[in-house]
Image: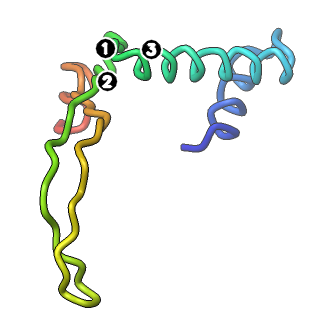
């Protein structure tokens, strides 16, 4: 689902809100999620899942094109763990 599809679905369920208001709400939610993760915080949405930051250790990789060794620095990645409700709906 894309952002525009999400906005359309919310607009269909809430006809009293304007499309511009819904776009603003979705933008604020995504901005708050992004800023919380950027600060290293954990974001949990009950029934859906939890987003957290994990650190990937530095490593030595091999470039498949010319077979040279390349140092890959450590980096932060986003980890998602499904909530119980989402997990049960996916595996029902």
The location of residue 27, given as percent across then percent down, is: 68, 22
Using the numbered discs, state the Cα–Cα distance from disc 1 to disc 2 in whole angstroms: 6 Å
Question: Which mark's residue is nearer the viewer, 3 or 2?
Answer: 3
Q: Which mark is residue 42?
A: 1
Q: Quadrant of the C terminus?
A: top left
Residue 32: which numbered mark, if any? Answer: none
Q: Residue furthest bottom?
A: 66
Count the marks. 3
Task: Specify the label residue 36 is tagged with.
Answer: 3
Left or right? Give the position of 2 relative to 43: right
Instruction: For the N terminus, give its image quadrant.
Output: top right
Lower position in the chain sequence, tag 1 or tag 2: 1
The x, y position of residue 72, in whole percent, is 24, 57
Q: Is residue 53 left or right of residue 19?
A: left
Front residue (pair 47, 64): 64
| Quarter of the rendering containing residue 63 | bottom left
Distance (Cα) linking label 3 and label 2: 10 Å
The colour style of the image is rainbow
The structure residue drawn at horizontal position 34% and vertical position 12%, both measured from the top left corner, is: 41
Asked if the residue at tag 2 contacts the one at tag 1, i.e. Cβ–Cβ closer than 8 Å, the answer is: yes
Q: Quadrant of residue 88?
A: top left
The circle drawn on residue 51 is: 2
Q: Are marks 3 and 2 in contact (CB under 8 Å)?
A: no
Residue 50, placed above or below residue 90: above
Residue 32 in the figure: left or right of residue 40: right
């Amino acid at each position: 689902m894309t952002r525009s599809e999400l906005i359309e679905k919310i607009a269909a369920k809430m006809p009293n809100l304007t499309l511009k208001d819904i776009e603003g709400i979705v933008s604020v939610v995504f901005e708050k999620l992004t800023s919380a993760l950027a600060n290293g915080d954990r974001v949990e949405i009950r029934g859906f899942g939890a987003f957290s930051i994990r650190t990937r250790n530095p490593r030595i990789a091999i470039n498949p094109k010319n077979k040279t060794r390349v140092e890959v620095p450590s980096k932060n990645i986003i980890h998602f763990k499904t909530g119980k409700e989402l997990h049960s709906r996916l595996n029902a």
